[in-house]
Image (cartoon, grey):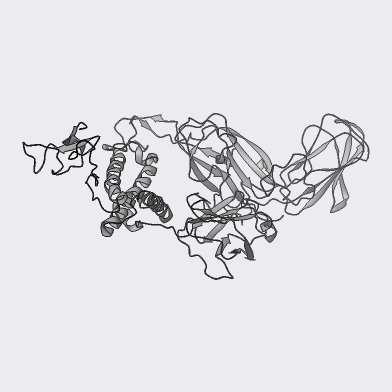
Amino acid sequence: MAITPNIIDVYPAHAALGIPIGDQVRVVFDQEMDLDTINTGTFVLTGPDDAPIFGPIDVTPFDEPGFNDEDILSSPYFQGYVKGTISFSKIDASGGIVDDSIVDITGAGDTWRTVAIFTPEKPLKPNVEYTVILLGDEAPTDDFDTGIKTRTVFDTVFTGTGTGIVTFQGGYTGTIAKNYVVEITTGGVTGNAEYIWWETNDLLTTYTGITSTGARELEDGIYITCDPDGNFTVGDTFEVVIKPPLVLVNNFRWTFTTGSGSILTPPSTSSTTGIESVAGNALGLGSLTTFSVESIDPEDGEYGIEISTDPYVGEVITIIFSDNVNIATLLGTAIKIKGLPANGNWDKYNATGDLDFTTSLSLKTLTLTLDPAQLYTNNIISIELDKSIADTNGNTLNTDQEFYFTTTYTPLYSDERRIRLDIGPLITNLPQETIMFAILEASIQADAFSFSTTISNSNYYYHAKWQYTTCVAEMILVKAMLGDPSLSSKMSKRLGELNVSRGGADYLNDLLAKLEDCAYGWEIGVQSGGDVTRGTSVRPQVGVKGELSEDAIVVSRQWEPTSGVGITSNRSAGNHKIYHSGRRDLKTFRRR
């Protein structure tokens, strides 16, 4: 597998936040790597420099602005390296663990992918940004190879009857592929048994040696060691494939930030164990690529896609990958498309569920054509791509991918532009679909509150419904914002002598209270079919005469205004007076 090695995945992801302080750092390469070249000198984790030097007090500190102790200067000898150990595991192209009993005797180098795991010797600091650096060769065209390299010494092929073990190791420094053979010429235990060795391209030249538990160099950086147990038998042979190394081109760097420290390690079921790409973080001139979805049409989260009116062809979804796709990996259940009710209410809205579709692949462009007449209004369409989908080089998506878009929503008694105008910068980055869904939910509620079957004032009724829907939709959005710590928590920042602070989320709670009042004010106009205007009580329309007192209205409670226009000292039943919406200005009469 004579291809330049690449980093295909890392964990934590670049710029990841809230990483548990007891977590590990992992790097996945696209082939077998030389484990001796991945060490604490080439796989480095750094944090802030915490080794200060004491100096004069009347100097400007080199630390970040606002550093409290100005007696301290940053150390010129960087002490931010995190101590730890590096271990390794093997995975296949789909991410499954490869057992250690699996060996590579061919030298292909693609039997598994090497995973390097850095484990800090103690938990990281909470709420701190850390940097990971992998060292490769920033000048691969020169004669001086540095940094991480591919595997050069492969697994041993044993032929014979003895129980002794010879292991080939080291890092090959030559430039051509070779096969080395060790043959036992004198049997016995390690230390007594003797051997000869040769290179298969030069069968006439042989060398002799005595078995030893210590490393014995053959040539060009290749060594052998012998297990202390077991016996060697005359004629036993040990053969290995040796190949020149390929260097990791360039150095790579990415950062992550730890969490508060309340979570030491992620739970086993946590999705945070997923691994993300570090494409674009090369420190040198090289590039880092991985297999991924580059774009999808309709776009992920797009609102209001048009439903096809063609009776023979349905809607079309186009997915463009970063590389040519292996069509065999698209078969079976690798792709799933579902049409679901936007709000999950199957009784209220039509939806097909699992959708039928046909596929067409052209290099890295995948076209999915839905069968006709499967989509309806108020549908959310979900596209799921299995992590096993791979390019023609064997690189997979590595994690399941999910995208969605929606058809138009109805009823809609308000407008996105009106809501953006009301709430302003709070929802600047909010997707259109989120706002439209809030309007849909508010519109459904408005329909449910329209109790009157007769619209007495159509102009006022439809205006009230518009205003009520707008207020309720904005309430839904603001309630969601209350769960955002960036909006709800207090903030205080200091830069030198400048101090900036902000209170908590009271302004959001105040806004929510105003919206609730707004919705309540317009609700009565919606309920009464426009008969009752905003700020007016619902008064009795029918009086019932009493059997014994014909002139008295039979009521459980009767109110008379105690203040306002038209109030006189001569207070009767109050039916001719002006009515008020609040009970605090009214008094109660007993049943007569």
Which residue is more in the foreground, 396 or 44? 396
Seen in the picture, residue 531 relative to 101 is either above or below; the reply is: below
Q: Spot the residue most to the left.
A: 569
Q: State whether the magenta stretch is mostly helix, strand or loop.
A: loop
Seen in the picture, residue 64 relative to 358 is either above or below; the reply is: above
Q: Is residue 249 left or right of residue 414?
A: right
Examine the rendering and report whether any part of residue 136 can be seen. no
What x and y, as percent, mark residue 389? 64, 55
Q: Is residue 564 left or right of residue 205?
A: left
Which residue is more in the foreground, 205 or 503? 503
Q: Residue at x 60, y 64 (%)?
A: 371
In the image, residue 223 lies in the stretch drawn in magenta: no
What x and y, as percent, mark residue 539? 23, 44
> For residue 294, which quarter of the picture?
bottom right
Q: Is residue 589 left or right of residue 299?
A: left
Q: Quadrant of the C terminus?
A: top left
Q: Residue at x 28, y 59 (%)?
A: 458
Seen in the picture, residue 95 relative to 71 is either above or below; the reply is: below
Which residue is more in the foreground, 349 or 340? 349
Examine the rendering and report whether any part of residue 425 can be seen. yes
What x and y, as percent, mark residue 249? 60, 53
Q: Residue at x 29, y 32 (%)?
A: 58
Q: Which residues are magenta?
A: 529-537
Q: Is residue 377 left or right of residue 473?
A: right
